[in-house]
Image (tube, rainbow, N blue to C red):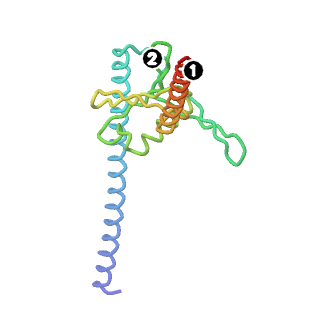
Amino acid sequence: MSATLSSNLLALGLGGLLSLALTLGALWLRRQLRRRALGARMRRASRGERDAAAMLRGMGYSIDAAQAPGQLLLEVDGRPERFDVRADLLVSRGGSRRVVETKTGDRAPRLSTASTRRQVLEYLHAFEVEAALLVDASRGSVREIRLPRAGAGPRRGLLLGLLLGLALGLALGLALGLALGRG
């Protein structure tokens, strides 16, 4: 084997080892950065939950449970299936219970964020409460979310208006008939 070929093979082998070392180093660094970001997110969430509990106590709520376990029952292909869920807090005030979801950051606390909206809906069903509280720990705000009552909405108002109009018309007709009948 010639010296040039040997040195080329050695250079190629060293280049391959360097490439492998750089790739492994990049993967290790990426994993470390992800762990650090996840740790920071978890610390921020934990701090947000503590801040939310303090904020809600200040609003007169009592904290019934933190990291409250619940179950969501769904029927899948005709068979009931249970799914475990965990809410940040369960609180009560004036005999009424609320499930609490705490969010931090810019997007997560908004109901326009699909994952937040789905989570709140899931909690409303799983914990069978009349309302959920969405706490934006970053901004210090609390929003109450309820499912509309069955029959609520424009149709119900229209029906009620028609019934009241009919009752008023009958009452006026009866009064006019009585007045004409006496005269």
Q: Are discs 1 and 2 less than 8 Å apart at CB?
A: no
Asked which secondary structure carries label 2, the reply is strand
Q: Residue at x 36, y 34 (%)?
A: 103
Number of residues whose C-alpha sits closer than 10 Å to that of mark 2, classed few (under 14), some (14–19) or many (20 or more): some
Counting from the top left corner in percent of width and height, residue 111 is at 38, 40
The three-letter code of the residue at mark 2 reads Ile
Could you tell me which quadrant the N terminus lies in? bottom left
Q: Residue at x 34, y 32 (%)?
A: 43
Counting from the top left corner in percent of width and height, residue 153 is at 48, 36
Q: Nearer the viewer, residue 142 or 19?
A: 142
- Give the Cα separation between the discs numbered 1 and 2: 67 Å
Q: Residue at x 33, y 23 (%)?
A: 51
Counting from the top left corner in percent of width and height, residue 175 is at 53, 21
Q: Nearer the viewer, residue 29 or 150?
A: 150
Counting from the top left corner in percent of width and height, residue 110 is at 35, 39
Q: Which residue is labeled 1 in the image?
A: 181
The three-letter code of the residue at mark 1 reads Gly
Residue 122 lies, with reference to residue 13, above or below; the image says above
Q: Which quadrant would residue 128 be assigned to in this image?
A: top right
Q: Is residue 9 visible?
A: yes
Asked which secondary structure carries label 1, the reply is helix
* Residue 63 - label: 2
- Residue lying at the far front in this picture: please name it: 183
Question: Which numbered mark, 1 or 2, is in the foreground of this view?
Answer: 1
Q: Is residue 124 visible?
A: no
